[in-house]
Image (cartoon, rainbow, N blue to C red):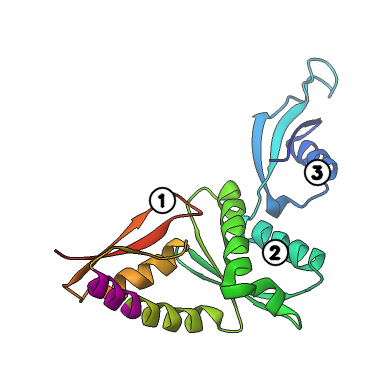
Amino acid sequence: MKQVTATGQTVEEAVESALAQLNTTKDRTDVAIIDEGKKGIFGIFGARPAVVKVTVIIDPIEEAKKFLLQVSEQMGAPIDIEIKRDGKQVLFVMTGEKIALLIGKRGQTLNSLQYLTQLIINRFSNQYLTVILDAEDYRNRRNDTLIQLAHRLAIKALKTGRDVALEPMPSYERKVIHTALSGNKRVKTFSDGSDPHRHIVISPVK
């Protein structure tokens, strides 16, 4: 958090001084007046400078976007980002010529980037935000794959009579599996392990 305390003959001058030091504009800051100052007699005797504390307001979504742009640049796959916010959920839709590099095998790179982006956005946010990264409609295609996988592994659990553990997945992918099998009374699902290695287990009901 960038913050400075500045003085001036007036509050306005003190604020201007602080903004110059922070190299920012007033609309991106939070100003706290510590002392309004005093002009004094003839503007000299008993005069007291105004004192303000100015703090730069950091936009968590902009910080997350900046992170993604930097990482993609370093990976040699520059991107454009469209941001959609719905309450506490923030969707970053990425496009670019080499977007496949950011998706990775079975979306592993995309999931890792999503995990890091979520850490960054919540470092600066005063409320917990959920991040979803998407590229080339990967999430919808992935959801279809997960639903098919859930039903296939449920059959396997019933045939073998044993628990079936899936690969680690982010929370919203685990939710897809839970939802897909919620109507199947012959199996139950639960999550095991801790992030980022938390995974679903499909267990036959005995």
Residue type, label 3: Leu
Residue 5, above or below 196: above
State the residue in front, 85 or 185.
185
- Name the residue rendered at 31%, 79% in the picture: 151
Residue that mark 2 sits on: 68
Residue that mark 1 sits on: 193
Magenta segment boundaries in residue numbering? 151-160
Mark 2 or mark 3, which is nearer to you?
A: 2
On residue 153, the disc is none
Residue type, label 1: Gly
Residue 24 position, x and y percent, is 79, 50
In the rendered structure, does residue 73 fall within the stretch colored magenta? no
Distance Cα–Cα, label 1 vs label 3: 44 Å
Residue 156, above or below 43: below
Image quadrant assignment for residue 98: bottom right
Quarter of the image where the N terminus is located: top right
Residue that mark 3 sits on: 22
Mark 1 or mark 2, which is nearer to you?
A: 1
- Judge the density around disc 3: few (<14), some (14-19), many (≥20) Cα neighbours within 10 Å: some
Q: Is residue 83 among what the camera can see?
A: no
State the residue in front, 122 or 36.
122
Residue 137 position, x and y percent, is 56, 83
Distance Cα–Cα, label 2 vs label 3: 24 Å
Which one is earlier in the sequence, the residue at label 1 or at label 3? 3
